[in-house]
Every structure is written in structure tokens, then in C-alpha cells.
Image: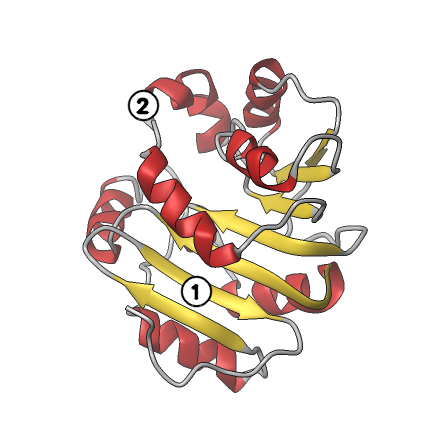
Amino acid sequence: MNFFDEVAGTWHKTSRCDEAKVASLLAILQLKPGETVLDVGTGTGVMLPFIRERVGAHVPIVAVDSSEKMLREALVCCDDADVHFVKADVERERLAGRFDAILLYSVFPHFRYPVGTIFKLVTDNLHSDGRLLIAHAQGRQHLNAVHRRLSNRVFSRPLLPVVEQVEEFVRVGLAVQSFGESDESYYILVRRGGCCAGRSSQ
């Protein structure tokens, strides 16, 4: 069984998010009322209420996950007719539509082809001047340790130091606007058609 299908029923209890950290990370994405959002790796939909609070009522949000059982849990928890749930593997499938913002919260280490996948999402699914945020509410070393413990159950790559990951993105032509990491968080903000950041903002 897929690891995320296996843990879907208890995910909300075992993976509670820190609202202050989430607010701080979403502030980097600078969501505005009326903006459309693609939530990649939505899981049980933990980020959807925070996105909705920022974009306003009745604005379409598309929530994508490769785990059918995670999406079932999200449907139960999310009473929002304007959230559209899609079962898809973004590494193997192309998604329809373009968005003002794409969020990848706590999913990036599970990509087998991280640079190619981000490049595809930016070029296929962002509007001109749209933003894509890779975000984690834990530090890199903590996340890598957690994933090492789970290595026999789910695929994950170690997160690179944020400067090294940014260099990989820049080499393929992605425009990184800002980035940073600490013991408490890790993020990279990519903008379609933007300029590359020269240094970390943290």
C-alpha cells in the first residue's frame, strides 16, 4: 500500500501544523484576494483553510495529490464547494490550467525528479509573473532525519542546503526570487518571468 494511503486516516492527528509558522511561510507567497491557487501535495487539505482565508470566498482552488485516501480525507474535512480535488502524480502527469500561485507544502523531498517537476509546474501552470513556493515548517536537518527513519516505507530525497537547491534551479533557467532556511523552516520562492535572487533573505 502507498505510504500516504496507509497513514491518511491518522494524518490530521499526527501531523498538526503550527499556524504561526504557516502564516509566516504563506506571507512569502503574498496571496491576494481573488488569486487562483494550485495546492500540490495537498494531503488531507491542511493548507486549504489558510489559502481560503487569503484569497477570499468563491475563488477556485485546485488541490492535487497522488494518494486517493488522502484526498478522501480532505473531502471529508473540507466543506468548500470551490475547492476542486484532483488525483494526479505531478511528476508523471501534466496538469490543466494556469494559476496565480502554486504551493508545495511539505512535499518537495518526495519528488524523484525535483528540478524537472518544478520547471514543468512553473512553465505549464503559472500565469505570467505567477509565484511558486516550496515550503517546510521544519528545518532541513530535522526533515532529513525524519525521512531517513521512514526510508523503508516511502521514497524521499534529502533536502539540499537551500543555496545548493537554488543553484540547481537557476542552472535550468528558473527565476528564484527569495529563499531561506533556519532550524524552524525552509523555503524557496520561484517567480515565472522574474529575476534571480542574489542571496538568501534569511
Above or below for 87 versus 151: above
| Residue 1 seen anywhere in this rendered image of the structure | no
Which residue is the site of mark 1?
188
| Residue 156 seen anywhere in this rendered image of the structure | yes
Image location of residue 199, percent across then percent down: 34, 81
Residue shown at 59% from the left, 83% from the top: 173
Q: Nearer the viewer, residue 39 or 67?
A: 39
Above or below for 191 versus 136: below
Residue shown at 75% from the left, 38% from the top: 60
Image location of residue 184, percent across then percent down: 23, 50
Task: Assess disc 2: are there few (<14), some (14-19) or many (≥20) residues with their C-alpha within 10 Å of its C-alpha.
Answer: few
Image location of residue 194, percent across then percent down: 60, 78
Q: So how many labels did they put on this image?
A: 2
Residue 11 falls in image quadrant? top left
Which residue is the site of mark 2?
14
Q: Nearer the viewer, residue 171 or 126?
A: 126
Is label 2 or label 1 in front?
1
Q: Amino acid at mark 2?
A: Thr
Above or below for 110 versus 169: above
Q: Nearer the viewer, residue 70 or 31?
A: 31
Mark positioned earlier in the residue sequence (2 or 1): 2
Q: Amino acid at mark 1?
A: Ile
Residue shown at 56% from the left, 34% from the top: 53
Residue 58 falls in image quadrant? top right
Task: Say left or right for 175 vs 155.
Answer: right
Residue shown at 63% from the left, 55% from the top: 101
Task: Say left or right for 28 vs 149.
Answer: right
Q: What SS does tag 1 mark?
A: strand
Task: Assess disc 1: are there few (<14), some (14-19) or many (≥20) residues with their C-alpha within 10 Å of its C-alpha.
Answer: many
Task: Say left or right for 154 vs 41.
Answer: left
Q: What's the colour scheme?
A: secondary structure
Image location of residue 163, percent across then percent down: 33, 76
